[in-house]
Image (spheres, grey):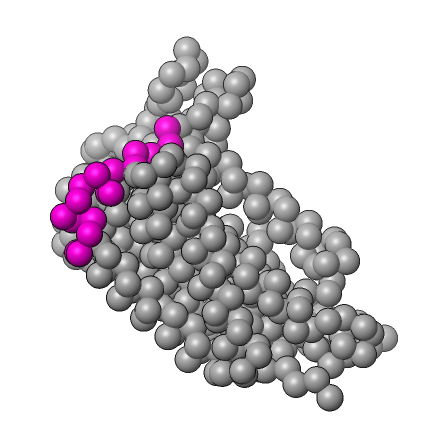
Amino acid sequence: MAENKIRKEVDYISPARRRGMGIFFLLVAIGIWGLFSRTSVSGEITTFMMSTSGTEIQLPGWTFNTVWVLNTLAGVTFVLGIYQLLRGFGKRMNKVLAFVVGIFVFSFLSWATSGQSMNLTGLLRNSLERAVPITLAAFAALIGERSGVTNIAVEGMMLMGAMVATLVGSMTNLWYGVLAAIISGALLAFVHAVLSIKYKTDQIISSTTILIFSTGMTSFFSARFMQNHPELNNPGFFSKIDIPVLADIPVIGEIFFSHSVFVYIMFVLLVVLHYAIFHTRWGLRLRSVGEHPKAADTLGINVIKTRYYAVVLGGMVAGFAGAYFTVGSVGRFDELMTGGKGFIGLAAMIFGNWTPIGSFGAGMLFGFADALANKLAILRIAVPSEILGMVPYLATMIVLAGVVGRGDVPAAINIPYEKE
């Protein structure tokens, strides 16, 4: 009875939010019609290429009348908005919201590509690659926050991991560079754990201090040593690996099965984390110390030890994520090269409701926004490049503004535990 009551409270959607979301759907429909459909030339064709490289089977391009499709999508969105205002979609509202956002993005792509062509397979492949550091950053933050410890220093740990991977990789080999990056992230996370768990320093202040330290140290080493000694900034990078048989599948193979080792490890971490957090005794203990540490302590769970392990493990993932920027991508280190991806990863974790699968989905969304900004610049549409560059960060701000509603925040997050 109590469980059903809690479920009903969670599923409850306030009338104000229901109306607001309905109005939002209607505005999207009007935007598709007014911004895209009315400004498109009648009779023009949009072409999405589904070409793949390295496979004998080539799929034909996807062509359609731009105005007709835009009008249809605007009509569908308008109907969804009216239904949301009159009756509402209830607990399915966020899924409908994702569908409406997808309609808007597809409408924008159709409008931008009108009279031209775009390789949709390449866009999706690029989206996955750009989602890797964001998703890994989300995983790093998620592990610690599930135990009740906030970590906004993920960006700094990624920066340190990127630099250390470059230095060690240049002097030894790429795998040693990745290992060194993981260790560097673990060490910074251990400092954060000691400050926030043992000495009960405010977790925001502790992680901010580590972020500032990492930013300063990486900038200093880059300017003082790596620029003056190019041999220390030339580790190379991992080449892509084609998965046998799977990589030969048209479209799907190129998008998912022809990448560097970092992409495959991201998928492994996704599966392992989801199973570990929700289907193992370790995961149950991790979640319990993040929700109700006193009750967990009463049952014999070592809250302090569990939080230490979680924070350090998150730091290791953050260091690995940082290595992607150098040995997994461009093969060199530049100051502040993470470009805020750690903070976007925090937003992806929140958007994903503190779950690995949700974080991956949100990471793909932000990666798509980033890839889309670069693709639209190539198409030379009538939008300033500065606006296009803001796309992934605007998406982050919208998510943090709570457009998807209240998340399942761990109850004991950012609260130091004192054993009685």
Say whether residue 261 is visible: yes
**Number of numbered discs overlaid on the protein picture:** 0
Going by the image, does 182 lie left or right of 370? right
Q: Is residue 238 magenta?
A: yes
In the rendered image, residue 97, in percent from the top left (x then y), is placed at: 49, 59
Numbered range of the magenta stretch: 223-239
Q: Nearer the viewer, residue 152 or 17?
A: 152
Q: Nearer the viewer, residue 35 or 195?
A: 195
Image quadrant assignment for residue 188: bottom left
Q: Quadrant of the C terminus?
A: bottom right
Q: Is residue 80 magenta?
A: no
Residue occupying the point 41% across, 11% down: 56
- Residue at the top extreme? 56
Residue occupying the point 22% across, 61% down: 220
In the rendered image, residue 272, in percent from the top left (x then y), is placed at: 63, 46
In the rendered image, residue 404, in percent from the top left (x then y), is placed at: 50, 66
In the rendered image, residue 95, in percent from the top left (x then y), is placed at: 55, 56
Image quadrant assignment for residue 224: bottom left
Q: Quadrant of the N terminus?
A: bottom right
Q: Nearer the viewer, residue 122 or 120?
A: 122
Image: 48 above or below 399: above
Say whether residue 87 is visible: no
- Residue at the bottom extreme? 420
Residue occupying the point 44% across, 26% down: 241
Q: Nearer the viewer, residue 181 or 14?
A: 181
Residue occupying the point 54% across, 17% down: 245
Image quadrant assignment for residue 291: bottom right
